Amino acid sequence: MSIDTATAAKVAKLARIRVEADALPALADEFNMILGFINELNEVDVSDVEPMTSVTPQRLKRREDVITDGDQQADVLSNAPDSREGFFAVPKVVE
Amino acid sequence: MENLNSLTLAEGRDLLRSKDITSVELTEACLRAAEGGGALNAVVHHTPELALDQAAAADSRLAQGDAPAMCGLPIGIKDLFCTKGVSSQAASRILDGFRPEYESTVSQNLFDAGAVMIGKLNMDEFAMGSSNETSIYGDAVNPWKLGDKQLTPGGSSGGSAAAVAADLCLAATGTDTGGSIRQPAAFAGIVGIKPTYGRCSRWGIVAFASSLDQAGPMTKSVRDAAIMLEAMCSHDPKDSTSAELEVPNFEALLTGDIRGKKIGIPKEYRLDGMPDEIEKLWSDGSAMLRDAGAEVVDVSLPHTKYALPAYYVIAPAEASSNLARYDGVRFGRRAQLDAGDGITEMYEKSRAEGFGTEVQRRIMIGTYVLSAGFYDAYYNRARRVRALIKKDFEDVFASGVDAILTPTTPSAAFGLGDMAEVDPVQMYLNDVFTVTVNLAGLPGISVPAGLDAQSLPLGLQLIGKPWQEGDLLNTAFALESAAGFRAKPDNWWSSV
């Protein structure tokens, strides 16, 4: 399974990272090298093995579905690059 | 008293409790050392005012006889921990200017125990790296040098390792996803322990790979590691994977008596082309444990060679998900946009300029292995292999082995820039002995055990059973006593 520049472009798009067209061939090469290394996993017989979901056998705890905090608008917005009138501000999303 | 900054935690604690020194004196010594240690680039956000406030508060607690373990002891905090009101940016441009409105559980636990923070410490960006060369702050530098050549302190907790080895603080926090506490500890000649997954709360620690990340202490001795680990651990309802277990008094378990313990030597860790010095260090270490009364046996961990490839599927997959939150909306950096740019351009430009090369590479690898059509072939297969790696350890422990001894790293510290031209996979090989421990969720500790022919420190790793950090620390204590590592780097960095 070899990654071409079109696939590299698609992955960059999915990851929401802008990659200029002239950087795609080098990126594809890197992916191929790393995937070549990862492909060693194909040597392992994993039939009858369940994918690990948790490293320690534990049942995730549950709690009442109730509000435990809130009323922290200023704190929540304090690190926003752009906020207005109590909201996060972003470029226009819908025309 | 001179050079208070070179004390261990245990020594500092005893001198504070006996009123021979004050926390303010001790803190001022560390602040001076940190201020003068700029050449190491270990401390990236200095917090002298906070430190002196905390020290004064610690002194009044000490005066009242209310002196918990860490009371008045100056430490450094890795930049990955969110510290309230203090820059916390995971060594990334994308978190430029981020000042959390909250405190991570681990740093809060340390402050509750009286610890003093002298500053935030350098690291690889988002903890992705093995040499501290991916940091937005620039390289951290190892206090150990090779002639005039500057060496890496390892990574990702490179600033923590450099700061502790150079006595800029008494100890530091680190985090470990694939070896990021143990490898830098080995490179800098200090002790570092990654506890069992779930011992330390991950809440407030910038997430890299959530099923692997654990915090731990980086210290000048095993005793210090025991003291500081106890202060860091807790059950935390804010981390659903945090273990609801009593935290033992680890220091009280340091007897040094390991008679009758069974130590396993895994044959798969004997790599082709392993330097003779590493081989010798390893066999010396097993001889020391045998002389201390332990039984040393050969064991097999058959899936070891698949640990790194499995890690480089699982960790990037989790990272691609965790780092999706850096979108230029709620915190951190937003790119300058051109007229007509919409929200997609904002995401793509902010992430392209905010993340460094290695972080981008791992996010995209993670995106690929999770994408439709490849999820089973890569991600699920890696998780199946991970289950086999964990079972290897379970089988060894079930056979009566108490701990496993390995080298921590395949080499001593290498030069800064030495790996710039090699492919990323070569850098990943640094974690070959440590990454299995994260995949299996086990506790692992690196103990400085000797110097190589070039007089650089080398570490040995002990791997323990889940939740048996006390027993593991005791074995490490016996190894530390037998190895008698006392070497310190010559001070070339200090400008005061």
Image: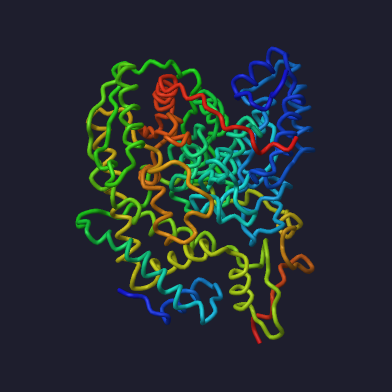
Q: What is the quadrant of residue B266 in the picture?
A: top left
* Residue sitting farthest toward the top: B18
Quadrant for the N terminus of chain B, please.
top right
Picture residue at 51% right of the left edge, 82% below the top: A21
For residue B135, above or below residue B337: above
Whether residue A14 sits left or right of residue B84 in the image: it is: left
For residue B42, above or below residue B295: below
Picture residue at 42% right of the left edge, 34% below the top: B452
Frontmost residue, B416 versus B95: B416
Q: What is the quadrant of residue B174 in the picture?
A: top right
Task: Report if residue B198 is visible in the image.
Answer: yes
Give residue A90's position: percent from left, percent from top: 69, 74
Task: Report if residue B445 is visible in the image.
Answer: no
Give residue B95's position: percent from left, percent from top: 65, 58
Q: Give the number of callouts.
A: 0
Quadrant for the C terminus of chain B, please.
top right
For residue B487, above or below residue B382: above
Frontmost residue, B369 versus A73: B369
